[in-house]
């Protein structure tokens, strides 16, 4: 099989995270119809920024300027089998997909991009001034950064579905008379739990009463920490702290889910972004005009909702309210959030405990951090079959762990102490008591530390791998993409499955229709394993 054609002009900068840049295919479906090349309509490219920077540096400073890629240039390669499966792909395939549900995570296709393509797309992105100023340092060449693929043949990247678009539902009729209005919302849910670990340091025990997200909001507001999405002109005190609570979003309660979504939409930061037909309309520093919102409302709900397009003063608020209400209907019924939370709850040691256990592992590795990191990042524990129906905080705190629990009496004693601490906090919550018994917590803290001083190497790896797995699922994003279905009689409610998205019926404000049908897809993105270097 020959690799497809890669034309830099077909791809534009879309967004980025800490390590990766996202490029979106920029040719419409009508432009590629009938082409002999497999079209990339509805797809995005995910490329490591360090790989782009290395290619650009090699091109300009080592081998001279590489030839400019011509229209239709191809890179011939029989297969990508000679390159090992990436850690991220393996992590998603073996761990994340089976535990959150295969229908919620699409695995990327590995592709090999020509160096000339990467060089040009790097230059065009840098020169376009679309990169946020705070992100520019991550695009600079650093000789200490190791590229993923150092071959002269090209750069390994990942081809993914563009979740601001929808694939057609096979059982629903397609209206060819008009293009449906597709709304896509990206949400970063954050950690949906409060730690109950007895290993929290005494000076950090505010963690027992506040979410990790609320603590980070306070630190950001005070200027102690800074996120990449903020503007350099924003100083300490200018950031308005969000009132969003991940506990509401993960609660399973319709009212609390809706409250969480309203708070996210009121103060979006980098945690709530909205697209309409592939164009971003809401986000931090992005706000459409009231007229634009009114037009979108008419396109979306004209046949179902009572919309007065001449009254535009609150169109933005009404559009966001319509979106959050639809999202509430979807999130309440799907199992994605409970499945994600079940993995997040594999954190039974907290970040404070993770640091201590990592130190124990380094000592057992004769003081070598590199050896400890290799054990944590490698396949040092067997992966077992996991049922997602178990209760993580029952008799076995780590019942949902995908890793085989090693035999270690001190590990069992430690987990017994952790369970006692969890049971204590559950009882306090039932009694409505906020204050904890300092004597009990201190005694539990000491007993746990005594156990950790004696646990085995495999026990350290087991606890830390579960913590890193939890951490990865606290840092995901997911898309909910939906459109209305013309004619409610044509659809009945249906859960999302491996073959297609779901259908939900929503209450209508229109006297003619009591409800309208929404076709939707939920997909997790940005789900990468966390490196052991996080613990250094």
Image (spheres, rainbow, N blue to C red):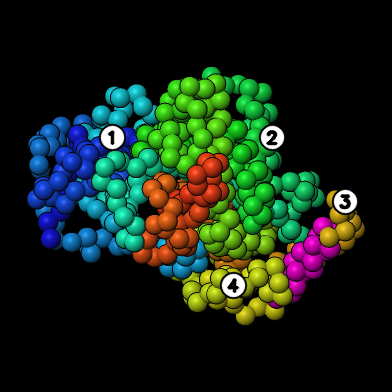
Q: Nearer the viewer, residue 3 or 516?
A: 516
Q: What residue is shown at x 43% (from left), y 36% (from top)?
A: 302
Residue 527 visible in image: no
Residue extent of the magenta highlight: 411-429
Q: Is residue 400 left or right of residue 484?
A: right
> Which residue in the protein does label 4 denote?
389
> Which residue in the protein does label 3 denote?
435
Q: Is residue 464 magenta?
A: no
> Which residue in the protein does label 1 denote?
12
Q: Is residue 458 left or right of residue 370?
A: right
Say which mark, if any, is on residue 218: 2
Between the residue at mark 4 and the residue at mark 3, the CA separation in whole angstroms equals 32 Å
Q: Compare marks 4 and 3 and give the one earlier in the sequence.
A: 4
The x, y position of residue 342, in whole percent, is 60, 63
Camera-side mark, 1 or 3? 1
The x, y position of residue 405, in whole percent, is 59, 76
Q: Secondary structure at mark 2?
A: helix
Q: Is residue 49 left or right of residue 119?
A: right
Mark 4 touching mark 2, by CB under 8 A?
Answer: no
- Specify few, some or many for label 2: CA neighbours under 10 Å numbering under 14, 14-19, or 20 or more: some
Q: What residue is shown at x 42% (from left), y 64% (from top)?
A: 497
């Amino acid at each position: 099989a020959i690799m497809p054609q890669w034309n830099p002009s077909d791809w534009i900068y879309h967004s980025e995270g800490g390590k990766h840049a996202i490029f979106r295919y920029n040719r419409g479906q009508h432009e590629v119809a009938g082409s002999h090349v497999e079209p990339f309509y509805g797809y995005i490219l995910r490329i490591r920024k360090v790989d782009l920077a290395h290619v650009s540096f090699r091109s300009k400073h080592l081998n001279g300027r590489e030839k400019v890629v011509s229209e239709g240039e191809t890179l011939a390669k029989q297969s990508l089998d000679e390159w090992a499966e990436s850690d991220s792909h393996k992590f998603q395939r073996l761990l994340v997909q089976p535990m959150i549900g295969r229908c919620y995570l699409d695995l990327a296709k590995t592709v090999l991009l020509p160096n000339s393509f990467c060089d040009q797309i790097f230059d065009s992105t840098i020169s376009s001034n679309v990169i946020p100023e705070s992100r520019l340092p991550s695009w600079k060449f650093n000789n200490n950064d190791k590229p993923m693929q150092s071959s002269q043949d090209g750069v390994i990247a990942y081809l993914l579905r563009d979740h601001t678009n929808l694939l057609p539902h096979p059982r629903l009729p397609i209206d060819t008379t008009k293009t449906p209005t597709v709304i896509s919302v990206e949400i970063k849910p954050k950690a949906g739990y409060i730690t109950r670990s007895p290993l929290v340091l005494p000076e950090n025990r505010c963690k027992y009463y506040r979410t990790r997200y609320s603590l980070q909001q306070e630190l950001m507001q005070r200027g102690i920490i800074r996120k990449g999405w903020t503007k350099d002109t924003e100083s300490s005190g200018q950031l308005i702290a969000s009132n969003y609570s991940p506990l509401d979003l993960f609660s399973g309660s319709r009212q609390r889910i809706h409250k969480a979504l309203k708070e996210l939409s009121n103060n979006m930061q980098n945690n709530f972004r909205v697209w309409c037909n592939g164009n971003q309309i809401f986000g931090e520093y992005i706000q459409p005009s009231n007229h634009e919102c009114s037009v979108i409302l008419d396109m979306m709900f004209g046949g179902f909702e009572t919309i007065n397009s001449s009254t535009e003063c609150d169109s933005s608020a009404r559009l966001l309210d319509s979106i959050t209400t639809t999202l509430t209907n979807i999130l309440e019924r799907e199992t994605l959030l409970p499945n994600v939370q079940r993995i997040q709850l594999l954190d039974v040691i907290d970040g404070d405990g993770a640091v201590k256990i990592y130190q124990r592992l380094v000592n057992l590795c004769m003081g070598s951090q590199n050896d400890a990191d290799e054990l944590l990042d490698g396949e040092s524990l067997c992966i077992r079959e996991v049922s997602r129906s178990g209760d993580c905080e029952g008799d076995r705190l780590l019942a949902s762990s995908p890793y085989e629990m090693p035999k270690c009496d001190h590990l069992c004693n430690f987990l017994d102490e952790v369970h006692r601490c969890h049971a204590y906090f559950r009882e306090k919550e039932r009694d409505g008591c906020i204050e904890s018994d300092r004597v009990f917590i201190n005694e539990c803290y000491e007993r746990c530390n005594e156990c950790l001083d004696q646990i085995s190497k495999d026990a350290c790896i087991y606890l830390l791998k579960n913590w890193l797995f939890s951490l990865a699922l606290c840092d995901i994003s997911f898309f909910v993409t939906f459109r209305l279905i013309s004619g409610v009689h044509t659809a009945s409610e249906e859960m999302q499955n491996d073959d297609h998205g779901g259908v939900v019926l929503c209450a209508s404000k229109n006297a003619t229709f009591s409800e309208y049908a929404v076709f939707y897809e939920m997909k997790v993105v940005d789900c990468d394993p966390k490196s052991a270097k996080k613990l250094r």
